Image (tube, rainbow, N blue to C red):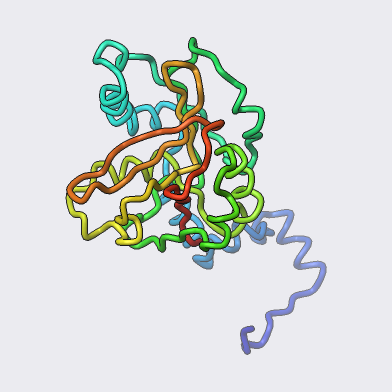
Amino acid sequence: MSNETPFIMSNEKFKQGLDDGTIVILSDEEANRIRGEGKEEKKNDKEKVNIDVEHIKEVYNDFLKKTFTIWYDEEKAKVEQIPIIIDPTTQDYKTLKSDIDEAKFGEYTVNPETQGIDFENAKVFILPEVEQKALEGKELWEVAEFIKTKYGNTHHIPGIEYWKWISEQTDQSKISDKLKDGNYYFNFGSLVRNSDGHFNVPCESWSGSEWNRNGYWLDDRWSAGDRVVLLEK
């Protein structure tokens, strides 16, 4: 608060000033702009990641095409890719398990919350062993429901963007050693519909020299070698 003595004028002069325009009443926003406040908010707005559909297509088109080429032949890999930008914690995975449509091959979901994260400095979180054991034998959709319920508000759920970053990384020192034990690490933040029309959960595993790019159906069983990748907020 300022210690300066306030300037006081009579009501008559104040009203006259309003009438002749020499006195202007500013909104809070206008006053803050004059003071220089709100600059940080504007700066943050400029740093927001573009997550509109067309931009997402540009970012992931080549990566998914190469992925489909690994899974299928080159002709199939030319399928049209259709991104759906959606918060994974709002998904009904039990319903999606039965959502099978070959005509929608190439459709995939994108978690808007995890676009633009600095993965090199992000803290990787792996489920505690007791939770991992409890999930063994369950279907992947059940694992997804568990994750969104328990960790959806406290952790980032990475998807295709993390899958891409790991798969294309040339400097392996940037990737957490936690992920290099040969297990399958699943990115439940995205689903990718395969040529049979099923939704796959993307995952990767380290072979010792390269990353293997895979995906498994929501009704596949969770095994002892499967792991969930989350990132601390």
| Quarter occupied by residue 79 | top left
Residue 39 seen anywhere in this rendered image of the structure: no
Q: Position of residue 170 (x, y in %)?
A: 17, 48
Q: Position of residue 78 (x, y in %)?
A: 30, 14
Residue 196 seen anywhere in this rendered image of the structure: yes
Q: Nearer the viewer, residue 54 or 103?
A: 103
Residue at point 28% right, 57% down?
A: 175
Residue at point 47% right, 50% down?
A: 228
State how many labels appear. Answer: 0
Q: Position of residue 149 (x, y in %)?
A: 66, 50
| Quarter occupied by residue 18 | bottom right
Give the side of residue 204 with respect to residue 223, left or right: left
Q: Nearer the viewer, residue 36 or 189?
A: 189
Give the side of residue 232 with respect to residue 179, left or right: right
Residue at point 42% right, 16% down?
A: 195
Q: Position of residue 153 (x, y in %)?
A: 62, 55
Outermost residue, right direction?
11
**Quadrant the N terminus occupies:** bottom right
Residue at point 58% right, 44% down?
A: 143
Q: Nearer the viewer, residue 230 or 47?
A: 230
| Quarter occupied by residue 219 | top right
Give the side of residue 3 with respect to residue 217, left or right: right
